[in-house]
Amino acid sequence: MSDKNEYWRELFGEDFPDYLDSETEPTQQEPEPEMELDWFSFDSDYYKQQPEPDKEDSDSFSDTSVLPNDITDIKHFTESMKTPKAPPAAPVQQNYVLKDVDHLEDEDKAIRREPRKRSGCLGGIMYFVFIVGVSVILTCAGWLAATDVLALNKEYLEAEITVSEDFTISDVAGDLKNAGLIEYKFLFKIFANIYHADEKIESGTYVLNTDYDYRALISQMGTSSKSQVSVTVTIQEGKTLEETFALLEEEGVCSTENLMGAAANYEFEYDFLSSDTLGDASRLEGFLFPDTYDFYKNTAASSVIDKLLKNFNSKMEENGIYEAVEASDYSLYEILTIASMLEKEAASGDEMPIVASVIYNRLGDGMKLQIDATIQYILEERRENLTSADLEIDSLYNTYLYDGLPPTPIANPGVTAILAALNPESTSYYYYALHVDGYHKFFKYGDSHQDFVESEEYAYYSG
């Protein structure tokens, strides 16, 4: 018996069909498909001969008797019959399902990953282009900023810049920008803050140009800069404080308002000034020494006044006035007050010592000074001739009503007037009046004086 029949007999036992008990082996020349067909036919006959299984056993029967469609070799079939088929288990199904899901997920990820790779490549190129673009922009911006900060390749331009006393860096940057000296206001403000420009810039008027870089612009707007615009101002003797300040404003040195504020409230460090007088601008009347000055335009008010006071102090020291005042019976302030009246009353320097003698004579005898210039000082406008109403003005400056000297000087006297006040002529005159020729006539008695003012020789004779 062939090995195959032996196998089947062992498998089927007593039910082994007799017609299979043959020693004849199929030759090798027989085609393989016919053998598969014979075995398949046998399996079909065998199946038909089996009793119908109970319904209760239908599930187990179906598991063992139904040939899988994909088995074509009987040997494979018998091996599968001999090997017990493991019942389906949840873990196996779960593993299978999970494995299958993972596979689907992997496929899904693979599908999704592919365009991401393409997008990532494109994104990388775009990112590179973006970086290059930004670099180019920043480079260009940096170059433009550098040309402005360093004043490179600028067309020459000159402009006058005025820095006020209460300036801010933003104001200065705006003025420079509007004048065309810089291109970027924000950049100048950043540089100025780093460079502490607010501590270096001073108020004033400056002539600047586009050759100056940011640092030079700031340094050129400092004190005593060669770019600062200066102006020469001559303050004549006998000018009042208000007239002096008006002249300085007219010349562009400083505003009257700022000068008045500084005169009243700034505490200047000079021995001849008292801090008790702070708050009143007239405290400086008589101390603003008349002279020719070089001022920078739009200089701080305190600096302007300090320059005048410094010159006053210097002139007093040079001419020995401080020592002469100490040797007199009057204070410096009283001497300045007398000298201020001399500036307003005397027709010339030569007359000043004589007019001074009249003042001292009247003061010594307790007479009212009756000096017209003291009333003119309080009038809004100077009059050629005082009216009777003017002589009745109730003011300490009205020397027709009040005894002694006015409360302050009525002008800023020069050295000649101050020296005349310290060294008056020794006379017996108590009166004087202006001649039509422009000089004064002096009188010892009132009657003589009255006769003169009623004559045609009097300068203000009205007939």
Image (spheres, rainbow, N blue to C red):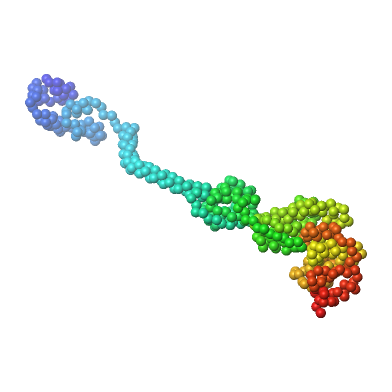
Q: Is residue 456 above or below residue 258?
A: below
Number of labels in the image equals 0
Q: Residue 448, image x and y in percent?
A: 89, 73
Residue 395 seen in this snapshot: no
Q: Residue 284, image x and y in percent?
A: 77, 58
Which residue is painted at 72% across and 54% down in the image? 307
Front one among 80 and 94: 94
Which residue is painted at 82% across and 64% down in the image? 351
Snapshot quadrant of residue 436: bottom right
Q: Quadrant of the C terminus?
A: bottom right
456 on left or right of 169 = right
Q: Residue 226, image x and y in percent?
A: 61, 51
Front one among 423 and 30: 423
Q: Residue 264, image x and y in percent?
A: 75, 58
In the current view of this chain or complex, which residue is farthest to the bottom? 463
In the current view of this chain or complex, which residue is farthest to the top? 1
